[in-house]
Image: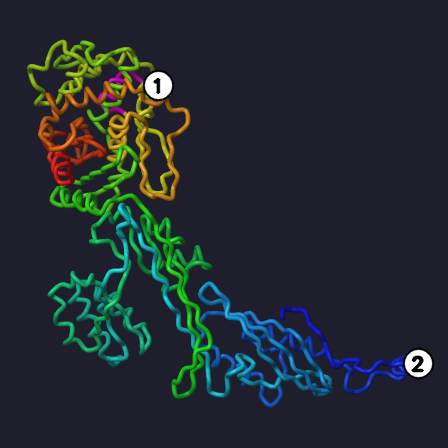
Amino acid sequence: MGAHRTITARATTTLATSALLGLLLTGCDSGSSGGPDASDAADTLASGLSSGSFADVDFTRVTTEEATKDYRTTVEGMGDVQPDVTAGDVKESGDSATASLTWSWPLGGRAWTYDTQARMTRVDGQWQVAWDPSIVESSLVDGVTLDLTPIAARRGQVIGAHQQPLVTDRPVVRFGIDRSRVSAGKAADSARRLAQLVGIDPAAYVNRVQAAGDQAYVAAIVFRKDDVPASVDGYQDIPGVLALGARLPLAPTKEFAAPILGTVGDVTAEMVKDHPDTYQPGDQAGLSGLQARYDEQLQGTDGAVVNAVDADGKEHELFRVGATRGRPLRITLDERLQTTAERLLVNVGPASALVAIRPSTGDIVAAANGPGTNGYNMATYGQFAPGSTFKSVTSLALLRAGLTPDTVVPCTPTITVDGKTFKNYSDYPSDGIGRIPLRTALANSCNTAFISQAGKLGGRDLVDAAASLGLGVDHDLGFPAYFGNVEPPASDTEAAADMIGQGKVLASPMAMATVIASVQSGSLVVPRLVTSVDVSPPHGVDPVSKAEAASLRSMLRGVVTSGSGSLLADVPGPPVIAKTGTAEFEKDGKVLTHAWMIAAQGDLAVAAFVDEGESGSGTAGPILESFLRAVD
């Protein structure tokens, strides 16, 4: 096999030296004069079979055009798959020769490889091929063709916590037009009626149906089996409409972690252009989220079956390779907790998010985005000022600067820095004004008290404290994640704003859940979603000491027992630590507020965020409280 050849039946008689010399002197016999030898003709044939062009091949009994037409008819059912054909051994006997051909068709990640033979005759010094369908495949005779049927690979599952399949094959119903069931003249009208029935663009669907072949099935829409609306019940009255049951890789619900998991669908023209060796028109692939990033792992390898089909449609199987299912993607989302989080956000009008992390492992067990995000992954990639939830970080920086939870600090109604006046939130308790311990300032979230201590911190103290709690240090977690931004202040005014989580400080809900998870665990927590991605604390970050962590937990517990987080005081289970927060921002000329709350209880750390709210305790707090009570 391959390009190496053994030519036999040549020089079969050993000649004496004198006889050989005589032969050379008198010239070659007429049978071997001129033209290519049989091996060259075999190579030319193999090249023509590979390319489909026989312009350089001489045939006996048929014309080049006839052989070309017959060959193309024979292999037409193989679609776009191109064979690689090489010539092997050539056996000659006078003016006849038999060439061995090795065929290799790339199918389903494997090659369908076999040998055939071609008979050749030397005519006027030229080797001509006796065309026969058996050259293509040994069992083929006139009128029998090859037919390739792909076997679609099952997409790999996305597996969540407790080995629970999150994205797996689930029953669906496709509604579409079967062109074989409706005449060309009526197909457009049927397509228009079906499009109106299922709520898709009629003009676009009509164009697709009209462009399809007479035997094509053109899907209009796919519904989950349990979600088929009653409005489509009349589809049977539309000529050509066919509903087909199938199974597709889907999450438990359409909304379940959709911005993070992503979608699977038909490949785009851009994907085919950029990755022609990977995607072909009509393929299914991950289009967004984890489905897109891990598409190569999840998509698997299609199989194939090749049949010989006679004129009556009778099939004989020649080759089969089974499809290989894609490898599963394992993530940390917990179906019950994710579903609970999404249920709590479903009626929140503004954009919202909730993230829950296990402090012991960093596992993200819920990363929910409310409907107001319009499909944007705000939970792990949003970028917002964290407001007073950042005082958890500021408190660590002040502890490192020499303050203690009991250090007395001034909580005044206002404080002015370089001409800019800062004040407390509108319903700040009047009895909290005055000289109060730092722990009380944190519990009541006194802005002026924290700003008054800005001079105790150096340029990088907040940056370093944030890094110790997992904020502002990027990691590649294998999914879109924003860890926040904390920079050395460029002015005293900016330093004052940074102390209360405004200025240039930014964070995602995931980042703030990481902060309180790190406080709860007493060590830097690195969030983890994709279990195959190695995550570890970054180098060069000072760890939180046991004493610092204990002080922070004590102070954040005070937020619940005697401060702005008192709504969590009677949540069943282990003690809850928490911090509320609001952050002002401008939109359409109006000053609005982001509403935050972060909390930890046992081995669960949670951040709740609402883009536009009244206050952390009044807007985000009830969502977080309901989550903790529901998952107890």
Frontmost of labels 1 and 2 is: 2
The type of residue carrying mark 2 is Ser
Marks 1 and 2, how far apart at CA = 100 Å
> In the current view of this chain or complex, which residue is farthest to the bottom?
61
Q: Are marks 1 and 2 in contact (CB under 8 Å)?
A: no
The residue located at (40%, 61%) in the rendering is 324
Category of crowding for the residue at label 1, using alpha-carbon neighbours closer than 10 angstroms: few (below 14), some (14–19), many (at least 20): some
How are the residues colored?
rainbow
The residue located at (23%, 33%) in the rendering is 603
Indicate left or right for 576 with 10 as reference.
left
Q: Which mark is residue 460?
A: 1
Q: Is residue 383 magenta?
A: no
Screen quadrant of the C terminus: top left
Q: Is residue 491 magenta?
A: yes
In the rendered image, which quarter is residue 355 located in? top left
Indicate left or right for 259 with 579 as reference.
right
Image position, residue 462 (x, y; %) = 30, 20
Q: Which mark is residue 197?
A: none
Label 2: element kind: helix
Image position, residue 577 (x, y; %) = 18, 26
The residues colored magenta run 489-503
What residue does disc 2 label?
Answer: 18
Q: Is residue 92 above or below residue 104?
A: below
Image position, residue 615 (x, y; %) = 12, 29
The type of residue carrying mark 1 is Arg
Label 1: element kind: loop
Q: Is residue 284 above or below residue 16?
A: above
The residue located at (27%, 15%) in the rendering is 399
